[in-house]
Each structure stands twice: as C-alpha cells, then as structure tokens.
C-alpha cells in the first residue's frame, strides 16, 4: 500500500520498547459527504475503523471495525486500497517507550441499511455517532475546537486525509 505521509514526533528513545498497533479505516463517500464517527463528548471526527487483531487481515479488520463503530456493513467487493499513514510517538504507558501505528485506509461502499453499533466502553462513553458530514466541517472541527484529553495528532491525521480526498467532492 502506498505511503500517504508519516507522523513521527521523534520524542522517544528508539532503543526502547515499542508497542505496535496497526489499524484499518474506511473511507465511505456519499453525495459529497463522508461517513465519519463523531465523538459527541469531545467533539471530533474520525474515520470508522480501528485496531487489527493478531491473525486478522487489514481487510477483515476494516469490515469488523466499520460495523462495530458505525453500524455500516462494508461491501467486500467494493474495497480499494487508498493509502497508509505511519505514526510513531512517545508512549504514555509506563513499560513502553514508543507507540507505532500503521493506519491502513480503504475506499469502500456500504449497504444502505445500518445495524446497531457494538461499541467498546470508551466509545460508548464518548457517544460515538455515525454522521455523513461535509469534509470541511470535519476538518475545521478537528483543528479548531477543544477536544479535551484527545490526542491532537490523531485528529490532525484525519484532517489531512480529508484534505487529500478533496478531489472526490471538488470534481465537476
């Protein structure tokens, strides 16, 4: 998969212990809007998706995570690779020096009906809600609002991906 960009804070000891957690995220476009998960508690937007479990393929994780977070069911034959964001930063865990995450983004289509979400406790506490949102609204929200304890780098990653996708809604 092509590398879109890297986010490396370089504020860690590279000889220390690393925690590696890849993820898969869905890019779902409809009528000039993009399907995003909106955290109502911290007021930010993220692409639906999440961590790839051991032994799971990125595509299987994409389908599972999109369904869990948004209630949307990905159509497997519609999945197309978009790109990868490589993120490295100092860890906030005591026994780990730094965190590595390869974020795999896929363009995909979904079935028209939604199912109930299956949220983790923290996702339910943040009140994750599926929204088809204007990309500029999501970019401005992620960059300009106060999101409390949320990692601004993750929100900037999503804003940059939205900017890279702008040709999809700017095309005549």
Image (cartoon, rainbow, N blue to C red):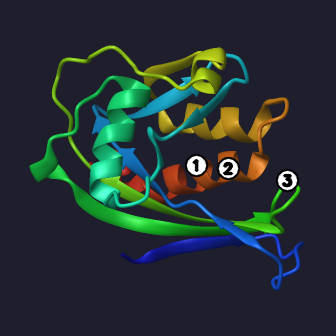
Q: Which mark is residue 92?
A: 3
**Which of 82 and 31 lies nearest the eye of the viewer?**
82
Task: Determine the secondary structure under disc 2.
Answer: helix
Q: Earlier in the sequence, mark 1 or mark 3?
A: 3
Would you call the spot at circle 1 few (<14 residues within 10 Å), some (14-19), or many (20 or more)?
A: many
Mark 1 residue element: helix
Q: Identify residue for label 2.
A: 154
Residue under the point 16% across and 29% down? 111
Q: Nearer the viewer, mark 3 or mark 2?
A: 3
Query: Against 138, is 163 above or below?
Result: below
Q: Which mark is residue 7?
A: none
Q: In this view, does 120 lie to the left or right of 14?
A: left
- Left or right placement of residue 113 versus residue 129 in this view: left
Spatial distance from mark 1 to mark 3, Cα to Cα?
Answer: 21 Å
Q: In this view, does 165 lie above or below 19?
A: above
Instruction: Write down the quadrant of residue 141 in the picture.
Output: top right
Q: Residue at x 82, y 85 (%)?
A: 15
Cα–Cα gap, marks 1 and 2: 7 Å
The residue that appears at 15% across and 48% down in the rendered structure is 76
Q: Where is residue 32 in the image (x, y as percent from the top left)?
A: 34, 35
Q: Mark 1 points at which residue?
A: 158
């Amino acid at each position: 998969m092509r590398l879109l960009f890297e986010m490396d804070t370089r504020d860690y000891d590279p000889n220390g212990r690393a925690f590696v957690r890849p993820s898969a995220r869905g890019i779902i476009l409809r009528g000039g809007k993009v399907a995003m998960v909106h955290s109502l508690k911290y007021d930010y937007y993220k692409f639906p998706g999440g961590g790839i479990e051991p032994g799971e393929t990125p595509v299987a994780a994409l389908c599972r995570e999109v369904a869990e977070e948004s209630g949307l069911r990905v159509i497997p034959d519609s999945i197309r690779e978009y790109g990868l964001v490589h993120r490295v930063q100092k860890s906030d865990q005591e026994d780990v020096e730094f965190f590595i995450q390869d974020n795999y983004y896929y363009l995909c289509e979904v079935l028209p009906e939604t199912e109930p979400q299956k949220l983790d406790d923290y996702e339910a506490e943040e009140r994750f809600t599926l929204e088809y949102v204007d990309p500029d609204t999501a970019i401005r929200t992620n960059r300009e609002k106060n999101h409390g304890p949320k990692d601004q780098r993750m929100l900037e990653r999503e804003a940059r991906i939205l900017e890279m996708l702008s040709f999809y809604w700017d095309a005549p």
